[in-house]
Image (cartoon, rainbow, N blue to C red):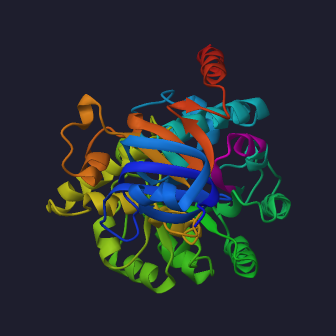
Amino acid sequence: MQPKKIDLLLHCRWLIPIIPENQVMEDCSIAINAGRIVDLLPKSQARQQFSATEEVVLDRHMVMPGLVNAHCHSAIRLLRGRSDDLPFQAWLEKHTCSTESLLTDPDFIRDSSALAIAEMIKTGTTCFAEMYCFSELIVDVIRNAGIRSQLSFAVHDGPTPYAKDASEHIHRGLTLYDNMGNHPLIKVACAPQAPNNISDTVMKQLATFANELDLPVHIHCHENASEIAESLTKWGCRPLQRLNDTGLLLPQTQLVHMTQISPEDKALLEQTNSSVIHCPEANLKLANGFCPVTQLTQAGINVGLGTEGAASNNDLDLFGELKTASLVAKAVGGDTQALSAHSALRLATINGARALGWDREIGSLEVGKYADIIALEIDSIAQQPLYNPASQLVYGQSGSQVTHSWVAGQSLLMDKKLLALNERNLIQSAKDWGSKIAG
């Protein structure tokens, strides 16, 4: 019998498929054709069954699904380190928002996003959810990089540099949605900004579009205690309850942060099947609290993982978030078994994919899914001896060990070298912008 012709064959030393759960496979191969996984089989059988245009030997590597950064502000990556160690409101109002002229500069947005995407690819992210007003400016950056993304169009209830009112924000966002059509690597979501500053009328209007178009809703919610207090004073209820009352708490709703959760909040999440996006390092750095991940996952609530933006988190390395999330969950819960290594890996893969509505296509290494895959070296001093691959990925410094990355079978990173982005040019651009901003 002649071997079946395919595009790509990966020969792996170790493989963590994510589904089935808690499994580590050894000495196996992944067969890929037309961007999708067609088989996972023992290495000894791979060349007998398949003839590949390209073969990649990963005999010193761990292979797993690409990471899903379910909340990011790539467009402000160039502000990293600009306003560290400040109170939340001071950081938000005096430093992030005060640079508004830069934050509306198309060149700044494009260069910042390209730098962020390069950092994410090099640390294992193959899919990210972007939240920014001028999302249409980075469409070409995403296409050129080859990464997968959910772009969220911001909706404000008043004038911004992007639009004069809520109606114009929504109109521009829906135009972006129409323009993207069925693009295989890009989705569009709506992102109401600051629930306390959005009227019920606008929320209900967004809920109508979300239901009619199956449009994802990506929103900061219960980020800190002061947000809850303001909502109780202004609206007479907690933000999550208000989202539910206006019809915006849906299965496709992605609630970012959720550091303040009451039993009533938890019940609403269970009833509506909404997802929570945990951003541990940003919340810790801004002293906003910590999302009760273990309680939520034990209740069957889907929790993904995000890095937030570089202005509140000094890196976009999702492996770092994995480690922080797991360690703090253990400390908060007083339980060494809270958020185990395999559970943490699911936050950044299949759970993130589920939150973004992509879990049937990515997030695990299964036949029929897109080949969104990363490989990490395991033969350095930091990786030896290797007893438990999952534990090593979560509790080690794994982002720097990423050597290869594929999205839908297309290579983005090979032997630590970016293929679609010019790293030297990105570094020089960042230095130039740094000098301009500091000056």
Q: Quadrant of the C terminus?
A: top right
Q: Nearer the viewer, residue 366 or 45?
A: 45
Q: Is residue 281 visible?
A: no
Seen in the image, is 294 located left or right of residue 97?
A: left
Question: From the viewer's perspective, is residue 314 above or below residue 306?
Answer: above
Q: Is residue 141 magenta?
A: yes
Measuring from the top left, give residue 325's x and y in whole percent.
32, 53
Query: What's the residue at 66%, 26% (across, down)?
Result: 422
Q: How many marks?
A: 0
Give the image quarter of residue 55: top right
Magenta stretch: residue 71 in it? no
Relative to 191, residue 66 above or below: above
Residue sitting at 45 percent across and 39 percent down?
313
Does 23 sit left or right of 91 as displayed?
Answer: left
Q: Residue furthest bottom?
A: 271
Residue at left offset 69%, top offset 63%: 190
**Identity of the residue furthest to the front in this view:** 1
Side (left or right) of 208 relative to 289: right
Q: Is residue 354 left or right of residue 99?
A: left
Q: Position of residue 203 (x, y in %)?
A: 68, 73
Q: Please state the horizontal and vertical placement of residue 167, each as a whole percent of the image.
A: 82, 64
Q: Quadrant of residue 197?
A: bottom right
Q: Which residue occupies the foreground of this view, 41 or 21?
A: 41
Q: Is 300 located above or below residue 282 in the figure?
A: below
Task: Give the position of the N terminus as an image quadrant.
Answer: bottom right
Residue 182 vs residue 264, the one in the foreground: 182
Q: Over which residues does the magenta segment extend?
A: 140-152
Residue 320 falls in image quadrant: top left
Q: Position of residue 20 (x, y in %)?
A: 37, 71
Q: Is residue 431 visible?
A: yes
What residue appears at the point 48 percent right and 47 percent down from the top-left corner?
374
